[in-house]
Image: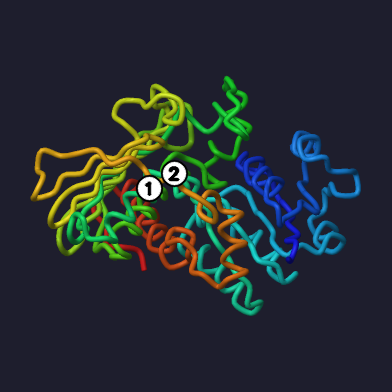
Amino acid sequence: MKRWRIAGINFDHFHMGDLLRQTFEHSAAEIVGISDEQPERMVNAAKNFGLNEAQVFTDYRACLEQTKPDIVVLCPAASKHGEWVSKVAPYGTHILMEKPFASSVAEADVMVAAMEPTGKTLAVNWPLVWDAGQQTAHRLIQEGLIGTALEFQHCGGNRGPLFHGADKIENEPTAEDKAASWFYSKAQGGGALLDYMGYGTTLGTWHLGGQVPLEVTCTSYVTAGLEVDEHSIAVIRYAHGLSRSETRWGTFTDPWTLQPQPKCGFVIRGSDGTISCYDYEKTIRVQTRERPEGFDVPVDVISSPNRNPIEHLIHHLETSTPLIGPLTLEISRIGQQIVDTALLSAQAKMTLPLVA
């Protein structure tokens, strides 16, 4: 059995710790190196996963040349996704990019173009995909339980990106922490809209079978003293009706501990019923024409290779089984188109046609 060599490069996003842990726990994978220009950001990972000095780099080129990974996990700031894929692609590795796809459709297209000559896979990780409720809801939609999926209502977010780190370890951020973080930098692709709305638009596109909307209307709220939004709401118009994606930093609680109000998650309306699937809950709610009063469905028990992106990508590479929808460039690009249009709409304060 092949043993997959995986390197983690750029620790801008704290999800790197989660992805390295998934690699560490995979029986057919090993962490061969990590790299970041700020060595202090790698201390915990090196300690947690027993890496020696020869496996820790501040120069990504040295990391790639010396460790020769099969897969590179990238977690840069949103505005640097294109830059980092362009840097790593010539080394001929598969790449798993932590969400979002990019900070713009143009940047996403740069990433795709950089990978094309290599013949290697570029996948985008949306952590909510691995929630059992999302996979259960999608299975029921595919089975036709609610007819044709026509509309999604999404509410997503958490207390804020600096309130928790890898493995969801809690922090209490200061004003200085925000000032130093790319999450709160407009130039680096920060803000709740760019960080989180892609969950709604990408997973919503997946649930709607890849349908492409016509136009988007969005409004955002920027807290005094900040450069970027902490709350945005987008209305997405399709030929057959409207969908909505709302994203907020500053929910009362984090949904993976205690669901805030309004709850974080999705409601999907179909031609013959509805499904509500709220983040990390153990049941989803279904209405059908036969049972309009509604009923609860226990979420599926998710097994390998659909528990996390590392095992899923490795399975895809070993078997050529298709990637789950949101990890694909096709679904993620439509999600990015909606996010781009929402951002421009909020800035212009008007409805705009979907960005091409």
> In the rendered image of this protein, does residue 242 appear above or below residue 240?
above
User: For this view, does 15 lie left or right of residue 212?
Assistant: right
Count residues near mark 2 (Cα–Cα under 10 Å), then give few for <14, some for 14-19, many for 20+.
many
| Quarter-of-image position of residue 340 | bottom left
Three-letter amino acid code at the position of disc 1: Gln
Q: Quadrant of the C terminus?
A: bottom left
> In the rendered image of this protein, does residue 343 appear above or below residue 123?
above
Q: Quadrant of the N terminus?
A: bottom right
233 or 95, nearer to the observer: 95
x and y percent of residue 132 in the render? 42, 44
Residue 350 in sight here: no
211 or 177, nearer to the observer: 211
Residues at discs 2 and 1 in contact (Cβ within 8 Å)? yes
Residue at 80% across / 35% down in the picture?
47
x and y percent of residue 233 in the render? 30, 41
Three-letter amino acid code at the position of disc 2: Asp
- Which label sits on residue 134? 1
User: For this view, does 25 lie left or right of residue 270?
Assistant: right
- Which label sits on residue 131? 2
274 or 326, nearer to the observer: 274
Q: How many marks?
A: 2
Q: Secondary structure at mark 2?
A: loop
> In the rendered image of this protein, does residue 64 appear above or below residue 254?
below
